[in-house]
Image: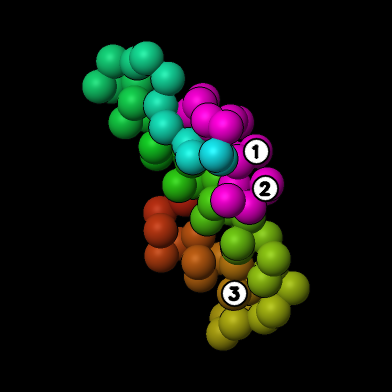
């Protein structure tokens, strides 16, 4: 697994085991859901940030469109 994905999983509160697989630590169902949601949001933000320099229609960026598509705030 990519080191950056491992770092994002850790930032989201997930455990990354020795082979790099992220999974929630011992958490309740609600905490686990929140960790997965945070992990997905972090990935979307990273991807959108990479294309924020590319303009789209209406003066927005491609990153804005990606964030909007996935419902992720900046």
- Do residues under tags 1 and 2 come within 8 Å of each other at their CB atoms? yes
Mark number displayed over residue 4: 2
* Among numbered discs 3 and 2, the one appearing first in the sequence: 2
10 Å crowding of disc 1: few (<14), some (14-19), many (20+): some
The magenta span reads 1-18
61 to 28, vertically: above or below = below
What separation in Å lies between label 3 and label 2 (alpha carbons)? 22 Å
> Residue extending furthest front?
19
* Foreground label between 3 and 2: 2
What separation in Å lies between label 1 and label 2 (alpha carbons)? 5 Å
* Among numbered discs 3 and 1, the one appearing first in the sequence: 1
Colour treatment of the image: rainbow
What residue appears at the point 50 percent right and 60 percent down from the top-left corner?
Answer: 67
- Do residues under tags 3 and 2 come within 8 Å of each other at their CB atoms? no
The residue under label 3 is 62
> Residue extending furthest left?
29
x and y percentages locating residue 66 in the rendered image: 50, 66
Secondary structure of the residue carrying numbered label 2: helix
What separation in Å lies between label 3 and label 1 (alpha carbons)? 24 Å
């Amino acid at each position: 697994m990519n080191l950056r994905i491992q770092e994002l999983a850790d930032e989201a509160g997930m455990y990354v085991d020795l082979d790099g697989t992220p999974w929630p630590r011992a958490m309740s169902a609600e905490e686990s859901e929140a960790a997965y949601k945070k992990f997905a949001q972090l990935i979307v933000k990273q991807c959108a940030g990479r294309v924020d320099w590319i303009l789209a229609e209406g003066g927005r960026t491609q990153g804005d469109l990606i964030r909007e598509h996935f419902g992720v705030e900046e």
